[in-house]
Image (cartoon, rainbow, N blue to C red):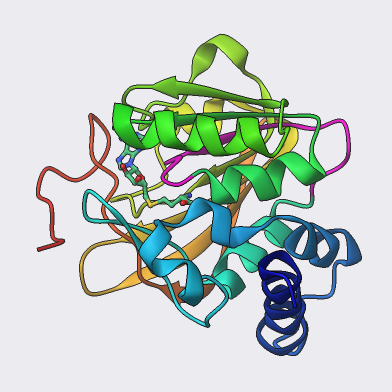
Amino acid sequence: MTEKAEFARQREKMVSKQIEKRGIHSQRVLAAMRAVPRHEFVPYEYQKNAYEDRPILIGKKQTISQPYIVALMTQLLELQAEDTVLEIGTGSGYQAAVLAELAGHVYTVAPHQELARNARAVMDTLNIHNVTLHQGDGSEGWPEHAPYNAIMVTAAAPEAPRPLLAQLREGGRLVIPVGGAGAQYLQVWRKKMGKYDHETIVPVSFVPLRGKLGWEEDWVK
Ligand code: SAH
C-alpha cells in the first residue's frame, strides 16, 4: 500500500470510530474530516500518530485538538457553503483547512509567525486558496472583515470576548472554550435579533488564549 493510501485508510477509520460513533451526524462535517489530510499538518515525527484519538504537539507549546473535538466544534458552527468564518488560533492550520472545506472563506489569526508560515505552506501544497492568514492578537477578533457568519476560538478564554460577539452577523454562531487551567467548557453563542444567548456543551482542555482579552499567565509548562 502506498503511504498516501495508508493514511487515507487510517483517516477513514478515525472518522467512523472516533467521530461518527460518538454522535457527529452532519454529513458535511464527516465528509470534510474525510477529505483533509491531517498528517500533512503535524510535524514529520508525529505523522504516524496523526489519526490517533488524541491531540498532537505542533511546537511552541501548542497542540492540534483531538479529531473528535475538531469535528464537534465544526458541527456546532452549522456552516453553509457561502459563509465567512473567523478562526482565532491558526496553529498548524488543520482546523482552518476543515473549515475551508465547508465555508466560502476562512480568516484565521495567529500570534506566531513561524507556525503561520508553516500553515500557509501546507495549505498551498494542498491547493487550499480560500483561507487568509493574519499574524497578531486575535482576542479582539479581526474587525476589517466582519461581520462573520461564524467564529471559532481554538484556545481557552476567561470569557467570550465582547468584540468577537460584536463581529457576528445576525444569526451567527461563536464556538469558544471558556475557563482556566483546570476547568473549561465549550460554549456556543448565538446572535439573535441583536441579542446573545449561549449554551454550554462539554468540558474541554485547551491551551490559553493570550493577548488583550485572554489570560495573562501561560499555564502550559
Ligand atoms: N486550531 C489549531 C490549534 C490551535 S492551538 C490547529 O488546528 O492546529 C491554540 C492556538 O491559539 C495556538 O497556536 C496559539 O498560538 C493561539 N493563540 C493563543 N492566543 C491567541 C491570540 N490572542 N490570538 C490568536 N491566536 C492565539
User: Is the stretch drawn in magenta largely helix, strand or loop?
Assistant: loop
- Residue at 46 percent across and 40 percent down: it is 90
Stretch of the chain drawn in magenta: 79-92
Rendered-image quadrant of the N terminus? bottom right
* Towards the viewer: 49 or 136: 49
Q: Is residue 15 visible?
A: yes
Rendered-image quadrant of the C terminus? bottom left
Classify 5 as above or below 157.
Answer: below
* Towards the viewer: 77 or 195: 77
Query: Left or right: 3 with respect to 133?
Result: right
Ligand 1 found in image quarter: top left
81 part of magenta stretch: yes
Query: Left or right: 196 with respect to 45?
Result: right
Image x and y of residue 144, in percent: 55, 9
Image x and y of residue 166, in percent: 54, 26
- Residue at 69 percent across and 45 percent down: it is 99
